[in-house]
């Protein structure tokens, strides 16, 4: 145990974020170099002592409740280190124009040694992101103020808003200077071209089909889209496309207004990403699944599937090789599944060694075929020290009246059946 702890401390000291180990009573058992540098407290001084002696301002009632939850569920939890619910105060030494004197922290509590009721706490400095968010919010306020003036001032509109006008056949008739400057085009070379020749859309994407359907019904569409500048740079835009109708209620033209939300999407990505595998987390999966359930166009032959993937004998891997190797298995699994799934599929880490996948536009046969393809991809993995890893799959497809809970229940039953029938296989449950 001592050698293992010493080894873990060496690893902790090499990390570029704060890492400490505490027990349920908040006694400190590990305190890495990052924390020594940024707090001024050396590990020899604080280890064995209670965190309350150094940071009495922390809400220990809520903090200990989070620790107990983490130990009970055996899965990481987030501690909300907001302004109204602060974690330990760490001075910010970075020289900036900001008035932010203490770090904004992202805090994750993970099981470490459950038998000793100890957890590992990782601390990430997200002050730069916080400042970026504040800057974005400030800019959004400025834009909101400008919008009142833009109605009467064509010059301001042209310089500040990305607008494209097309005829009823989606051929560009005019663009603003802001649009051309942002995307790297000249207005003269755009006029007469099809908008789709600049922004190539995936014709099979559900959102694209929804946009097309609304516009054909002479209704406005709004949403987010991923586009590319002329130089290939990828950006995210908040877009509104409105049809203009003549006196006979026929479409004469379209106006598309774009707003760059690339930075906002990057911030959002942090909140919906599993820190270990970099996949969507459970919160994001729940959100996407709910959106999928709300769509009305599903039929018995054109529905969507849900797959639960569970690593076989994962506890044995952790017990034999340690949690670091276990983490490596999960990371390799995530990378393998990411490469194997379709671009329209949604992959997320459900928790522990379980992953979930949503597959739009499939029936049961196609969903099972896809799951077996993913199973074979995992079977061909080779993880250093561990070797071959397999996984079991449970499959369910949406039918009328389903909720996420009922679909998850069927997929989980399929997974249980796959485990019972020897693992490394795909099983499905219809009802």
Image (spheres, rainbow, N blue to C red):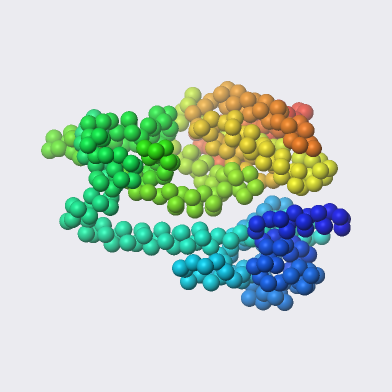
Q: Is residue 249 left or right of residue 277?
A: left
Residue at the spot x=50%, y=33% of the render? 344
Residue at the spot x=18%, y=38% of the render? 245
Relative to 89, residue 10 above or below: above
Q: Which sits in the foreground, 100 or 300?
A: 100
Tell me residue 270's x, y (percent): 54, 51
Q: Is residue 334 left or right of residue 185?
A: right
Question: How many labels sit on residues?
Answer: 0
Task: Give the quarter of the image for residue 219.
Answer: top left
Q: Quadrant of the N terminus?
A: bottom right
Residue at the spot x=72%, y=77% of the render? 53
Task: Give the quarter of the image for residue 190.
Answer: top left
Q: Quadrant of the C terminus?
A: top right
Tell me residue 243's x, y (percent): 24, 39
Tell me residue 395's x, y (percent): 62, 31
| Residue 147 visible to the viewer | yes
Tell me residue 420's x, y (percent): 76, 31
| Residue 307 visible to the viewer | no
Residue at the spot x=54%, y=49% of the render? 272
Q: Which sits in the foreground, 11 or 430?
A: 11
The residue sitting at the left extreme is 247
Relative to 145, residue 166 above or below: above
């Amino acid at each position: 145990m001592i050698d293992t702890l010493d080894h873990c401390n060496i690893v902790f000291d090499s990390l570029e974020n704060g890492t400490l180990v505490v027990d349920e009573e908040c006694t400190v058992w590990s305190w890495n170099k990052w924390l020594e540098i940024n707090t001024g407290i050396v590990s020899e001084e604080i280890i064995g002592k209670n965190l309350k002696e150094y940071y009495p301002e922390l809400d220990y009632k809520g903090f200990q409740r989070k620790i107990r939850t983490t130990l009970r569920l055996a899965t990481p939890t987030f501690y909300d280190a907001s302004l109204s619910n602060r974690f330990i105060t760490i001075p910010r030494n970075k020289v900036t124009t900001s008035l932010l004197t203490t770090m904004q922290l992202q805090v994750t509590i993970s099981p470490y040694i459950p038998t000793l009721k100890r957890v590992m706490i990782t601390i990430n400095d997200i002050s730069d992101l916080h400042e970026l968010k504040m800057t974005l919010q400030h800019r959004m306020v400025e834009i909101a103020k400008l919008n009142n003036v833009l109605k009467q001032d064509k010059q301001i509109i042209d310089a500040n808003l990305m607008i494209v006008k097309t005829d009823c056949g989606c051929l560009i008739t005019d663009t603003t200077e802001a649009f051309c400057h942002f995307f790297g085009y000249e207005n003269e070379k755009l006029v007469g071209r099809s908008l789709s020749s600049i922004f190539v859309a995936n014709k099979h994407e559900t959102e694209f089909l929804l946009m097309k359907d609304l516009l054909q019904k002479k209704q406005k569409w709004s949403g987010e889209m991923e586009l590319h500048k002329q130089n290939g740079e990828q950006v995210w835009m908040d877009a509104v496309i409105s049809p203009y109708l003549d006196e006979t209620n026929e479409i004469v033209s379209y106006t598309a207004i774009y707003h760059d939300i690339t930075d906002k999407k990057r911030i959002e990505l942090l909140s919906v990403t599993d820190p270990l595998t970099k996949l969507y987390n459970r919160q994001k999966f729940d959100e996407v699944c709910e959106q999928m359930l709300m769509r009305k166009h599903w039929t018995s032959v054109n529905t969507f599937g849900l797959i639960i993937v569970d690593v076989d004998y994962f506890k044995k891997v952790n017990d034999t090789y340690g949690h670091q190797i276990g983490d490596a298995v999960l990371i390799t699994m995530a990378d393998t599944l990411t490469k194997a799934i379709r671009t329209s599929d949604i992959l997320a880490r459900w928790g522990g060694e379980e992953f979930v996948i949503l597959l739009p536009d499939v029936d049961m046969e196609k969903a099972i075929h896809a799951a077996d393809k993913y199973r074979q991809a995992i079977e061909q993995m080779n993880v250093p020290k561990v070797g071959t890893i397999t996984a079991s799959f449970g499959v369910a497809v949406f039918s009328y009246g389903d909720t996420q809970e009922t679909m998850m229940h069927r997929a989980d039953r399929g997974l249980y059946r796959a485990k019972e029938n020897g693992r490394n296989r795909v099983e499905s449950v219809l009802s």
